[in-house]
Amino acid sequence: MMTAPPTAKRRRSLRARLGGLLLPGFTGLLLLFLFAPIAVMIAFSFNDPAGRQNITWQGFTLRNYVDLWGRSQITDPMVLSLVVATISTLVATTFGTMIGLALTRYAFRGRWLMNLLIFIPMTAPEIILGASLLTLWISLGVERGFLTILVSHIMFNISFVVVTIRARLVGFNMSLEEAGMDLYADGRTTFWKITFPLILPGIVSAALLAFALSIDDYVITLFSAGRTVTFPLWVFGVSRLGIPPEVNVLGTLIFVTALIFIGVQLWNARRADPSTRPAGPVTVVGR
Amino acid sequence: MRSLRRGLAPLLLLLPGGGWLVVFFVVPMAFMLLISLQEGTFDTGYQLTWNFGIYPQVIGQYWELYVRSTSFAVATTLLTLAVGYPVAYTIAFHGGRLKNALLLLVVLPFFVSFVIRTLNWRMILSDNGMVFGTLKDAGLLDQNFHFLATPASVIFGLTYNFLPFMILPLYVAIEKIDRRLIEAATDLYASRAQAFWRVTFLLSLPGVVAGSLLTFIPSVGDFITAEVIGAGNPQVFMVGNIIQRKFLDSLDYPAAAALAFVLVAGVMLLVSVYTRLVGSDRLAG
């Protein structure tokens, strides 16, 4: 640096300063772009539309938020989605954590096959997962509905849970377990008293991810739903021409709930030891 | 006894989840293959006749959709890379203490349902909506201009929806780069551009590869964007739209299954060629 001629140095600093403005400016614009449909969704959840179209701003109202409750055609799909998300999260998180433990703890033959089995469902286009499950239901004559939706959600969630848990387990300190064993704890006590509390933040991250993926899924659900209507299917069905305000109201409520969850997680992470921090936003992106 | 338990333990841990994936992922793929080889109609029933002729038939009939899906997905991948790289770079190198907060801001919009986000884009970009309607009223745009239902609008929608899948792996890769290497390059009289392309970009290649795959694969199979932002215009349909319609509307299961299988095979082929070109060792990084 010292040997660079002064003119080059000044030119560099000017360019550096310009670049220093350019990149943050671009990043800011991109964030605005990412939030554009969210801002419109929130604004139009308060719109007082003339018809069912809801495409131009008419006036502010809170009526959309009040009218929502007690209308079963709106609340039933939401409740169904919450039930499917809860059960599929519990099952997929349990199964996925077990696989994560097996993959990081034990040496066994066929590990590559297991890795492939985890990896492919995550990378295959969703329509393939949905369509192939549909062929299974058709071939076996299974009637599509709540159970088939649940089965499909558990299936696509397992891989995401395994990947999240494994990221957590890789840095796990095995000597803590050995210390437990040395102090005459049996295998079960060691697991529940030492291993489980240590990997719990990873399990929580994985469960949140699974829940978010399940409640948002449209494509795979569509193929396993039959006549049953989950929340995303209902949204798509009622918005063929325009978006009714109820859709934006529920979207806004989901967004606010997610914000609260993230806030609580961040707050917990700040209080806790840095080594037990949740895996962070990288692991919680939805499709 | 103890060693036997250790031998059984991984099996017992793997069995429920692994079994679930075999029964509801691997087995359905086999069923899809079998259904693609059936003949008949929905009303009279389908019979397995090992009709491999369905494959040349659907490719001959729908090759244009595969070409369109691939070109839309490639355009989406390049756009997300061009837009996402500067953002990932800025957050990784200039984010400072705001790094995690900025990353959170990038993924936050995606907590709102995919369907709702896409529907709102359709409204924002409609012919007389808040963007183009305003421009038309101001006389800045021809009254006949429309954006929805064009190929560009579908690529736009795909780019929006899959941006975080590009930004996050890019960020992870760029964040890992030892910045002293870039200093070393400039100390050795590399220009800033040279230092960027030959040090930063090269070292971030694992992120570029991962991000490209995570963007390309879901884009090429997508059908919601073409349905909503493409306004159901058959001129912008992707192969997913036809697969979905054949499975759920016209109930032409063999052709639908064959189309889906060609899609899987095509994606696997493209991905393996791509990873071979870039060097699969870089994927591990």
Image (cartoon, coloured by chain):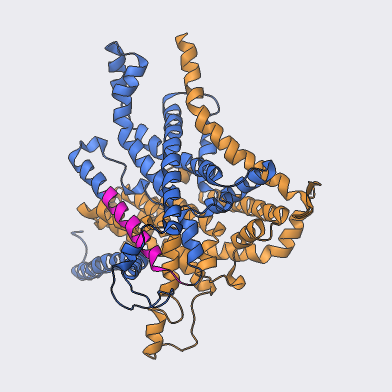
User: Which residues lie in the magenta part?
Assistant: A242-262
Q: In the picture shown, does residue A189 fall above or below A104?
A: above
Q: Residue at x 54, y 42 (%)?
A: A147
Q: Nearer the viewer, residue A277 or A237?
A: A237
Query: Any idea which chain is the blue one in this picture?
Result: A
Furthest residue toward top: B1
Chain B representation colour:
orange
In percent of width and height, residue A237 lies at 51, 63
Q: Is residue B115 left or right of residue B38?
A: left
The secondary structure that most of the magenta stretch takes on is helix
Q: Residue at x 41, y 47 (%)?
A: A82
Q: Residue at x 20, y 36 (%)?
A: A273
Q: Is residue B245 visible?
A: yes
Q: Nearer the viewer, residue A282 or A91?
A: A91
Residue B185 placement: quadrant = bottom left
Please tell me whether residue B285 belongs to the stretch shown in magenta. no
In percent of width and height, residue A148 lies at 56, 44
In percent of width and height, residue A187 lies at 36, 16
Q: Is residue B280 visible?
A: no
Q: In the picture shown, does residue B269 fall above or below B190?
A: above
